[in-house]
Amino acid sequence: MIFRQLFDADSSTYTYILGCETTHEAVVIDPVFEQHTRDIALLRELSLNVKYSLDTHVHADHVTGAWLLKEKEGAEIALAADYEADGVDIALKDGMVLAFGDSSVTAMHTPGHTNGCFTFVTNDKQMAFPGDCLLIRSAGRTDFQAGDVHTMWKSIQDKIFSLPDDCLLYPAHDYMGRTVSTVAEEKRYNPRIGGDAREEDFVGYMNNLGLPHPRQLEIALPANLKCGRADESITLPDWAPITITFAGVPEVAPDWVARQGEAVCILDVRSQEEYNGELGHIEGSLSIPLSELRDRLHEVPVNRPVVVICQSGKRSAMATQILRSVGRDKVANIPGGILHWTKLALPGVNQT
């Protein structure tokens, strides 16, 4: 099975991509709204088609990216039926199986952090995604969203700890850089519920955490009860058919650029020798070598979008990031550079 673990630093949220190697169908667990372009870029690069967007629970610290995955990629949204959230395609009940190609996950109801928490377990029981019910050497808070510490005790002890000892546990969050644990580790070392802890020990620990409410609570909860559906005022870039690479670089296809004429500025960041060399250059392009770009930013037009090119698309990717760092939002890299442009036999190349 194809597996990737991704991280949102702002909310310390892990997003997981699981894909079938045969059919390339996939599920995304706990997507983050602001990381949508990153996730889509990776899915595209791995040739994965999203069948389901799964949230382990209604999050209080970030807005889910479920609606964007549905709107842009056709993913069905799965969330606990208990929430009665708007926009849900599959209202999860305990024991439901969600298949994607030759793989599947089983939805195991593990309330306690909230009343609608689920743990997703792979069909071979080698991986489980317990959301905020069980964290690495920790457990999710139980003081709001219909949470209950006694219910969480039962969810962990009777369900999560019933999984094989070598089952890998991938949490929804971690604030110390930890990425994975196992059932055996948490049974033995979790200071809240592991070792010889009894229910009264766990309850006493959890009831005295004294945590402040999550800083995005007032935004995240209402948004997540409609599966992260964005207001009409929130839009993705639309000045060109932009795609974002997994490295965060906006790209636009060279054939689109060739059709725009003078409506865009083509910035060539190769050396002057390369610009006038055997590969030639695109007529009307602006030549500023990458090594000089930071000192010559004032020469780059501000009244039209800028697309950047080099020999293969690597130096121009860096130039794109430089332009973005100074507030230029209508900028994109031409992947493959002048080599790809020539291979496609696009017009406008001036060769000496």
Image: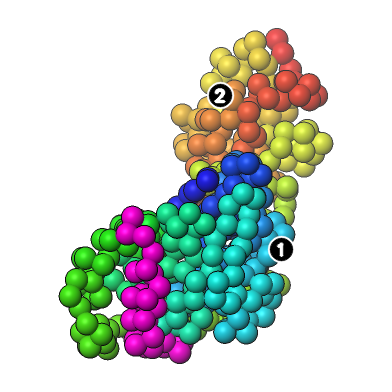
The reply to whether residue 194 is in sight is yes
Residue 279 or 107: which is nearer the viewer?
107
Residue 33 or 270: which is nearer the viewer?
33
Observer-side mark, 2 or 1, equals 1
Discs 2, 1 touching: Cβ within 8 Å: no
Q: Amino acid at mark 2?
A: Arg
- Relative to residue 81, is residue 325 drawn left or right? left
Where, by quadrant of the figure, is residue 288 drawn? Answer: top right
Q: Where 125 sits versus 89, above or below?
A: above
* Residue drawn 73% across the image and 40% down it: 264
Label 2 environment density (alpha carbons within 10 Å; few <14, some 14–19, many ≥20) = many
Identify the residue under disc 2: 270
* Residue drawn 53% across the image and 45% down it: 2
Q: Amino acid at mark 1?
A: Glu
Q: Which residues are magenta?
A: 140-166
Identify the residue under disc 1: 71
